[in-house]
Amino acid sequence: MNANERKARSILEDLNINKPPVPVELIAKKMGAKLTFEPFEGKDDISGMMFRDGEINIIGINSSHPNTRQRFSIAHEIGHLVLHKKKLFIDKVVKIDFRDTTSSMAIDKNEIAANAFAAELLMPRDFVQREIRREISKQNNVIGKEALIQKLSNTFDVSTQAMEYRLINLGFLVSN
Ligand SMILES: [Zn+2]
């Protein structure tokens, strides 16, 4: 686990959050952020932003995006809030191919850090491991890959794409 992931983990522990789905809006508030939701009309490509000025921290989320996407954006912006000093981050939607390491998002080190933080916050390694075991045992030890991804993404309230990537990243699934 790297420092960004450890930070996410310690926030979950401090707030006694020990099962999915992780209450990401509550965490934002506990970390001192004011959350705002707006459709960002004409700026569909913006997923979220974080702005700070003195005591004020604002996380703005694009409310026209799917709920699971908004949850990931909130987690990502909390990452900027707790990991980084910069006053303003504006995050654009990247056509997410998580395996594409050449995209600008993936080479900016603040973005890599915020994404790693967000993944651990929303889909903590040990929660994922526990839920995989639970699903497998419920299904008499036989469950298809797609069914598993679907179940887990429901349980964690994340997109199937985010969950699939997380499972690959944690070594629970192999990438095709
Ligand atoms: Zn960002």
Image (cartoon, rainbow, N blue to C red):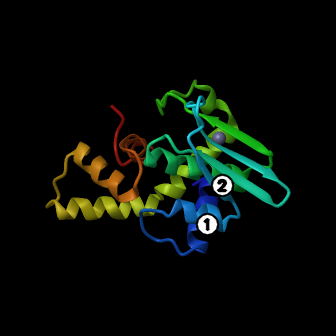
Nearer to me, 9 or 55: 55
Give amino acid for label 1. Answer: Ile
Disc 2 packing (10 Å; few <14; some 14–19; many ≥20): few
Cβ atoms at labels 2 and 1 below 8 Å apart: no
Q: Secondary structure at mark 1?
A: helix
Q: Which residue is mark 2?
A: 3
On screen, residue 34 versus residue 137, left or right, reads right
Please report whichever mark, 2 or 1, sits nearer to the chain's N-terminal start. 2
Q: Is residue 40 above or below residue 147?
A: above
Quadrant in which ligand 1 is drawn: top right
Residue at screen point 19% across, 51% down: 143
Whether the residue under disc 2 has CB within 8 Å of ligand 1: no
Q: Which residue is mark 1?
A: 11
On screen, residue 152 versus residue 166, left or right, reads left
In the rendering, at what x and y percent does residue 66 appear?
44, 43
Q: Assign the N terminus to one quadrant of the image.
A: bottom right
**Residue projecting furthest to the right:** 54
In the rendering, at what x and y percent does residue 136 appear?
22, 59
Q: How many marks?
A: 2
Residue at screen point 29% across, 62% down: 133
Nearer to me, 151 or 139: 151
Disc 1 packing (10 Å; few <14; some 14–19; many ≥20): some
Give amino acid for label 2. Answer: Ala
On screen, residue 137 versus residue 40, left or right, reads left
Q: Secondary structure at mark 2?
A: helix
Q: Assign the C terminus to one quadrant of the image.
A: top left
Gap in Å between the C-alphas at discs 2 and 1? Answer: 12 Å
Residue at screen point 28% across, 54% down: 151
In the rendering, at what x and y percent does residue 33 appear?
69, 59
Residue at screen point 36% across, 35% down: 175
In the rendering, at what x and y percent does residue 59 appear?
66, 51
Name the front one of labels 2 and 1. Answer: 1
